[in-house]
Image: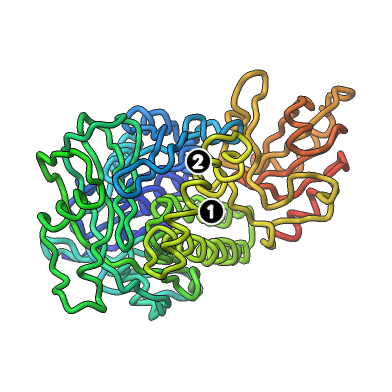
Amino acid sequence: METITKTEVLIVGAGPTGLSLAAQLMRYGIDFVIFDKKEGVTDLSKALVVHARTLEIYDQLDLARKAILSGSIVQKGALMHDAKISAHLDFSDFGGRLSPFPFLLVFEQSKNEHLLYEHLQQNGKDVQWQTEMNSFTQDANGVKAVLKAANGDTQTIEAQYLVGCDGASSLTRHLLNVEFEGSTYPRLFYVADVDMEWKTDEHMFSAALGQDAFVLIVPMQGEKHWRLIGNMPEHDYNNQVSSEVSYDEVENKVKQLVRRPLDITNVRWFSTYKVHTRHAEKFKYGRCFLAGDAAHVHTPAGGQGMNTGIQDVYNLAWKIAFILKGYAKDSLLESYNEERLANAKHLLHTTDQFFNVAAGEQWYFRFIRNNILPSVASFVSQFGAAKEFIFPMVSQIGLNYHDSSLSRHEGDHDFEVKAGDRMPYFLVNGANVYDQLRAPKFHLLIFSDGQQDYQGLKLELEKEYGDLIDFNVIPLYPRVIEIFGKNQTFKVLLRPDNYIGFISKEISLKDLKAYFRAVA
């Protein structure tokens, strides 16, 4: 039996990226259909870390605290060489004053999927599980996809847009005939979730580094529950040994590197894998988009993958919503490809560099790993200024869209913060500034010296832009002056994803009107 369903957005894939897109579209009141060939959300831990920027996004959905309560905050770390600790690392208050979530949270993929899926169900939506896409076509008016359920029933979905969130082997990307350019590391890696007797702080990770191998031991929630990540040089592709690896070989390699008492009592999950670094040529093809692993894959350095996919769709959702609501022109969607492709290319480059330091086999990477890395790591973890330098890169709060067509720099030359930056975090009357920025719309912020009440400006804004923009007046607190480098009244226009559109000392709507004529 075949049915026809009309919707606004068709989401292919219900992993963290697809479920996050669904959650964001609900904020804007956009209808969608989401499906996946799986039977349900994964029970495998897979991706491990949730970073501060993702928690800021989750906080808009009232999900951040639930994630933190179900996860484990990493507070300490240790680098090990030759069975000795070569550096102690301190990640407590890692982000200092930079985010309401200044830490690394171990909150694995399965828990992210369950959290997001429950959020969808609580809001009256669901996923079509055990459903695959047979084909799709698109034209100037929309997208038409044919889906097939496990029982053989087919349905046609007619949507305005289609978003492929269907992973590294993306059928969406294949049907769009998009190249996935990049390379594969000639090394074999493993991941295992285990129950283990291991005498160390339950909130501390350890990294044991050898000449040609490493193992990362990360605490997970639950007593004696650990994640092992490492490589097996004996099975690299340039060797003649079979690529098949038994768990016993992995355990032996871990013990060989650590050389300290440990007893693995249970293996919850174990897998070997290749590391790829690839990205699609574009992320937008007509009315179809790629996001998450369907658009880009990279090394696991820094735990960036799942977080990047969630941020892809956070960027995309508001743009689709504003077009469907008639607030913006179709050209706004070009900025998704512009902003997120540039970010993916940068991410592939930086994660490759970090990964080579940890696992590169060349002599110079070994030298850095054994002689330089311990000193640098200790320095970074001991000094607040060093932490605040590293944290934005790891946590993704430092990601910016300075070069985006949506970032107007005419008025930001005298400011420390620029158009395209994420809105900095600070407190307003002791409360998180982001609490005032939860509404799914643009935000006009006046940072005031207290000489005016701006009621006239507020009324003019409401008359001109209705529900499109909200209005906030924030005092020029000392922390605001420190962050922005300006002690006189100024205004900031924030996009719905809380990135800065422009900054101006001109307290009128003239430049705001010009901005919307240009970009929306």
Q: Which residue matches tag 2?
A: 378
Say which of marks 1 and 2 sits in front.
2
Answer with the quarter of the image where residue 260 lies.
top left
Q: Position of residue 6 (x, y in %)?
A: 36, 59
Left or right, residue 65 beside residue 248? right
In the rendered image, residue 272, in percent from the top left (x then y), is placed at: 21, 61
Q: Which amino acid does label 1 sit on?
A: Asn
Q: How crowded is mark 1: few (under 14 residues within 10 Å), some or many (20 or more)?
A: many
Quarter of the image with the N terminus is bottom left
Quarter containing the C terminus = bottom right
Q: What element carries label 1?
A: helix
Q: Which residue extends farthest top?
A: 429
Find disc 1 in the rendering and name its residue.
315
Left or right: 464 in relation to 251: right
Amino acid type of the residue that numbered disc 2 sits on in the rendered structure:
Ser
167 lies left or right of 514: left
Separation of disc 1 and disc 2 at Cα? 35 Å
* Label 2 secondary element: helix
Front position in the image: 106 or 146: 106
Quarter of the figure with residue 442? top right
Residue 309 visible here: no
Q: Residue at 51%, 46% (x, y): give it.
A: 375
When asked about the image quadrant of residue 124, the answer is top left
Mark number, residue 476: none
User: Up-down: is 464 above or below 4?
Assistant: above
Expressed as whole percent of the image width and height from the top left, the position of residue 457 reads 82, 34
Q: Callout 2 environment at 10 Å: few (<14), some (14 to 19), or many (20+)?
A: some
Above or below, 243 relative to 440:
below
